[in-house]
Image (tube, rainbow, N blue to C red):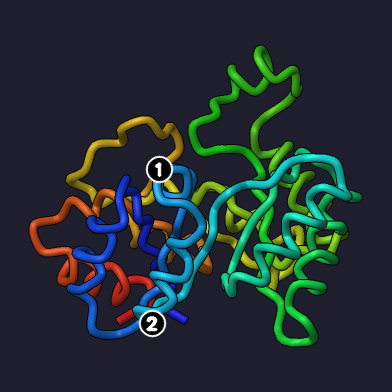
């Protein structure tokens, strides 16, 4: 599995197909809300038929039974990774794993990771708007420990938190980090961002890269350069 997950931040199937035609080898891609709500879950089958692996990023967050049923159906689609919000609690996260196991029908279940805090969330917003006291790091570590207790495979976190999460939850507990930009790129709407080289240094297992690749003049070249960095080449 590649360590670079390309975020397909497009709004149509045609854009996705044209973009992926540039890649001759299977890569990991992220299908999120924008694309899913525009084209439906049939996008999963389309991308699978092109030979790629899928992180379906829909961040389920509901009562345990509803999440369990939803995850069963997502596993039936053949996704490779999916996720929930850790804020839903341990019972909900356990139900998510149970649902994925049911949907896998005895085969390998999709990996399930938990969203700790969104990379757009500042300390001020977390404290004042969400009503969660303390530093963002404290909340992230608590959520990561809950995710591990619930049987999740890892968490989505900021690159700046990956090392502390591995220290708290073990090296085999996956850290998937969005908010990755090349040094020349704008931060856009994300507060906690970093470069691929810094992500590698911090021990991130996988990075999610969107606009730096999808808006590049040469997406394949940019992808290969980022992947080489993550592989330590």
The residue shown at (23%, 48%) is: 183
Q: Quadrant of the rendered structure where residue 214 is?
A: bottom left
Question: With 2 as the anchor, is 215 left or right in this view?
Answer: left
User: Which mark is in front, 2 or 1?
Assistant: 2
Question: With 125 as the anchor, is 105 left or right in this view?
Answer: right
Q: Residues within 10 Å of mark 2 (few under 14, many from 20)?
A: some
Residue that label 2 marks: 51
Residue 164 image offset from top left, x and y in percent: 65, 54
Q: Quadrant of the rendered structure where residue 229 is?
A: bottom left
Residue that label 1 marks: 193
The residue shown at (25%, 69%) is: 20
Q: Residues within 10 Å of mark 1 (few under 14, many from 20)?
A: many
The residue shown at (40%, 79%) is: 49
Q: Which residue is at the far right? A: 91
Residue 160 image offset from top left, x and y in percent: 52, 47
Q: Which residue is at the far top? A: 128
2 and 1 marks in contact (CB < 8 Å): no
Question: With 20 as the anchor, is 184 left or right in this view?
Answer: left
Of residues 158 and 222, which is closer to you in this image?
222
For residue 95, above or below residue 1:
above
The residue shown at (45%, 38%) is: 192
Residue 191 image offset from top left, x and y in percent: 43, 32
For residue 223, above or below residue 36:
below
Upstream in the sequence, badge 2 or badge 1? 2
């Amino acid at each position: 599995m590649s360590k670079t997950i390309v975020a397909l931040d497009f709004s149509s199937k045609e854009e996705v197909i044209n973009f992926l035609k540039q890649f001759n080898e299977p890569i990991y891609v992220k299908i999120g809300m924008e694309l899913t709500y525009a084209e439906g879950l049939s996008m999963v089958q389309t991308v699978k038929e092109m030979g790629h692996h899928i992180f379906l990023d829909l961040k389920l967050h509901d009562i345990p039974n509803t999440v369990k049923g939803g995850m069963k159906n997502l596993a039936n689609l053949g996704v490779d990774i999916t996720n929930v919000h850790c804020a839903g609690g341990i019972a909900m996260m356990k139900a998510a794993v149970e649902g994925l196991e049911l949907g896998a029908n005895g085969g390998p279940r999709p990996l399930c990771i938990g969203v700790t805090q969104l990379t757009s969330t500042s300390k001020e917003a977390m404290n004042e708007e969400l009503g969660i006291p303390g530093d963002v790091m404290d909340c992230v570590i608590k959520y990561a420990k809950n995710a591990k207790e619930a049987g999740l495979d890892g968490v989505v976190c900021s690159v700046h938190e990956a090392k502390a999460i591995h220290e708290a939850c073990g090296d085999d507990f996956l850290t998937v980090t969005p908010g990755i930009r090349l040094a020349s790129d704008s931060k856009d709407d994300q507060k906690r961002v970093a470069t691929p080289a810094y992500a590698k240094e911090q021990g991130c297992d996988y990075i999610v890269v969107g606009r730096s690749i999808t808006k590049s003049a040469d997406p394949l070249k940019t992808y290969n350069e980022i992947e080489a960095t993550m592989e330590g080449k």
